[in-house]
Image (spheres, rainbow, N blue to C red):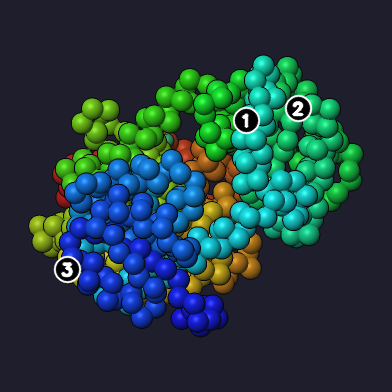
């Protein structure tokens, strides 16, 4: 609202594309007060309307099924024309299942038909327009203010120009993506000024390094740099020279580790965006790899990308067909006599019709990277709640189940309502669904998380901080975030009997849990000796293959019967 006033008298222009008169009118009426609305009856008319419009169009609301030119064809044309694709599209559809497909095709959002509350629709339009305008504002600047390198958009544009000029026709060019291992740590420990300083230095060194080559560089975002250069024979030497320069600078965080992804001898037909996405992918591939600092985009990565795209395309159908199965792994309380079953963790698997059983490690990070995780998680939560209610009816007792809440879910404004709705639907108490939130979510946006966690706890949900010890929560933060249990990351248990440091860390984590006055859960316990040690150290709850692997709901009943 405030934004609209601020922008003064001029209403932004919105184009509604729908073949049905009644739909156009309905939507048009909702938007008319706030926007200057124009209409088109199909894709072709929309193209005409855009080229004829004497004013900038800020948003397209697009129907999919239309005669002459349908929405899909329109989106195709739209993607081919940079002028068109500067306008955001919201697709209007009655088929919510094609959501993933629509977003993948290039729309930014969608509105379900029949239309819901006008305020909601208006708010959505407002938000999308704002986002796009902000984005364009940023894009329009050519230079990254902090580092003085090119901005990403300009960098891409420059590459197009270089290619068009024919200058590199005979030259083998590579795309390099470079970033800093654990950059956020530098920010956290040394402060943002120091972080900025490091980024500036790296930018300077990159510029110097490519000075005598055919090459240009940009800061793509945060701590990622892109370099477009004629092929370098020895990338390790190239990286080492950058690292040596960095070490000579003498800033506070010594021993910065860089990571590089390379897409070699790139194809002229591929867009700059795509070649650098591939380089970045190669770079991400070696994240956390302490041996290799350089990754190459190769056929394996290419295959993996195709595999991932298939998973993205298939998710909607899989939910519909119930191909996602939820398994349960028991948690036992061990401090008082014989182990007692206290709860279970719900863990999802994908029983794919052609690819077979897929483990969550393959698709969860993927779905987290594009937001699709939200609908999968909702499905898992619902399935878990249903199962708890089934067992309650059958055995006359409630086995609380913990579900995983992805860090992405934290940004869902409906999170609390969704969870409360699910619990209500199956007649459960909120205290019977535990929520596991990974520690890294806590370090990313602590303020937001504290708020969400507080709201969830107010409703009665129990919060377990998952993978504890892998994130970087400070003790201060831990005391600020209300939680009900700490789940120690599996790596500590795995190494506890092998090295002393891990054992000390296990002790420390148990101490922290005492300090916070919450129980500590150890997962990944496989052996008797691990269990005995943990018990002695005062660990409260154990989960792991020692008791059982995650099993189907049916098999889990054996543990309930005891
Ligand atoms: P997590 O939340 O840390 O889950 C524990 C993982 O450790 C599970 O792997 C479990 O099968 C495995 N595990 C349990 N005990 C042992 C043991 O004794 N030894 C070993 N080696 N492994 C053990 P899984 O099922 O492959 O899940 C991997 C990760 O995927 C989970 O890690 C979680 O982060 C994510 N995930 C699984 N289901 C969901 C879900 O429904 N939603 C979300 N957002 N994430 C999920
Ligand atoms: Ca978990
Ligand atoms: Ca975990």
Residue 68 percent across, percent down from the top left: 22, 46
Contact check, label 1 and label 3, Cβ < 8 Å: no
Looking at the image, which is closer to me, 376 or 112?
Answer: 112
**Marks 2 and 3, Cα distance to the nearest angstrom?**
58 Å
Residue 165 percent across, percent down from the top left: 67, 29
Sequence-wise first label, 2 or 3: 3
Which SS class for mark 1? Answer: helix
9 vs 421, left or right, is right
Which quadrant of the picture is home to ligand 1?
A: top left
- Report if the beta carbon of the residue with label 1 is closer than 8 angstroms to ligand 1: no
Residue 38 placement: quadrant: bottom left
Which SS class for mark 3? Answer: helix
Q: Name the residue under label 3.
A: 22
Q: Can residue 254 be seen in this view?
A: no
Q: Mark 1 points at which residue?
A: 164
Q: Name the residue under label 2.
A: 214
Contact check, label 2 and label 3, Cβ < 8 Å: no
């Amino acid at each position: 609202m405030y934004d609209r006033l601020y922008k003064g008298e001029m209403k932004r222009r919105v184009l509604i594309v729908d073949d049905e008169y009644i739909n156009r009118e309905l939507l048009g009426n909702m938007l008319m007060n706030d926007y200057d609305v124009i209409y088109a009856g199909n894709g072709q008319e929309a193209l005409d309307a855009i080229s004829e419009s004497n004013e900038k169009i800020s948003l397209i609301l697009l129907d999919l099924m239309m005669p002459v030119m349908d929405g899909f064809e329109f989106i195709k044309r739209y993607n081919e024309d940079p002028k068109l694709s500067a306008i955001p599209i919201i697709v209007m559809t009655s088929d919510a299942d094609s959501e993933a497909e629509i977003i993948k095709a290039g729309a930014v959002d969608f509105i379900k038909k029949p239309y819901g509350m006008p305020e909601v629709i208006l708010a959505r339009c407002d938000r999308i327009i704002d986002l796009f305008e902000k984005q364009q504002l940023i894009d329009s600047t050519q230079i990254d203010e902090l580092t003085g390198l090119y901005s990403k958009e300009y960098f891409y544009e420059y590459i197009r120009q270089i290619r068009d000029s024919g200058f590199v026709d005979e030259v083998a060019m590579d795309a390099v993506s470079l970033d800093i291992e654990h950059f956020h740590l530098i920010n956290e420990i040394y402060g943002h000024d120091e972080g900025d300083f490091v980024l500036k230095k790296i930018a300077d060194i990159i510029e110097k390094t490519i000075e005598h080559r055919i090459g240009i560089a940009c800061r793509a975002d945060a701590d990622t740099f892109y370099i477009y250069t004629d092929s370098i024979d020895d990338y390790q030497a190239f990286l080492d020279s950058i690292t040596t320069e960095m070490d000579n600078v003498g800033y506070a965080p010594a021993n910065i580790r860089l990571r590089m992804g390379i897409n070699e001898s790139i194809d002229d037909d591929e867009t700059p965006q795509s070649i650098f996405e591939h380089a970045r992918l190669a770079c991400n591939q070696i994240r956390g790899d302490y041996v290799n600092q350089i990754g190459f985009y190769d056929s394996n990565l290419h295959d993996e990308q195709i595999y991932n795209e298939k998973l993205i395309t298939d998710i909607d159908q899989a939910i519909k067909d119930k191909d996602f199965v939820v398994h349960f792994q028991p948690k036992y309380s061990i401090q008082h006599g014989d182990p007692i079953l206290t709860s279970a963790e719900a863990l999802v698997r994908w029983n794919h019709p052609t690819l077979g059983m897929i483990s969550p490690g393959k698709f969860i990070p993927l779905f987290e990277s594009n937001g699709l995780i939200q609908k999968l998680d909702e499905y898992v939560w619902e399935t878990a709640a249903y199962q708890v209610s089934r067992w309650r009816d059958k055995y006359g007792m409630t086995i609380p189940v913990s579900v995983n809440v992805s860090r992405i879910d934290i940004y869902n404004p409906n999170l609390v309502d969704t969870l409360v709705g699910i619990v209500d639907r199956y007649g459960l108490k909120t205290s019977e669904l535990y929520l596991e939130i990974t520690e890294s979510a806590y370090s990313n946006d602590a303020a937001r998380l504290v708020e969400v966690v507080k709201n969830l706890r107010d409703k009665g949900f129990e919060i377990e901080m998952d993978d504890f010890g892998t994130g970087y929560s400070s003790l201060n933060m831990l005391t600020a975030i209300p939680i009900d249990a700490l789940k120690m990351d599996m790596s500590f248990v795995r190494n506890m009997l092998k090295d002393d440091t891990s054992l000390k860390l296990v002790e420390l984590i148990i101490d922290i849990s005492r300090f916070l006055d919450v129980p500590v859960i150890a997962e990944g316990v496989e052996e008797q000796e691990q269990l005995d040690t943990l018990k002695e150290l005062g660990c409260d709850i154990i989960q792991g293959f020692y008791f059982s692997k995650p099993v189907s709901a049916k098999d889990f009943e054996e543990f309930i019967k005891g």
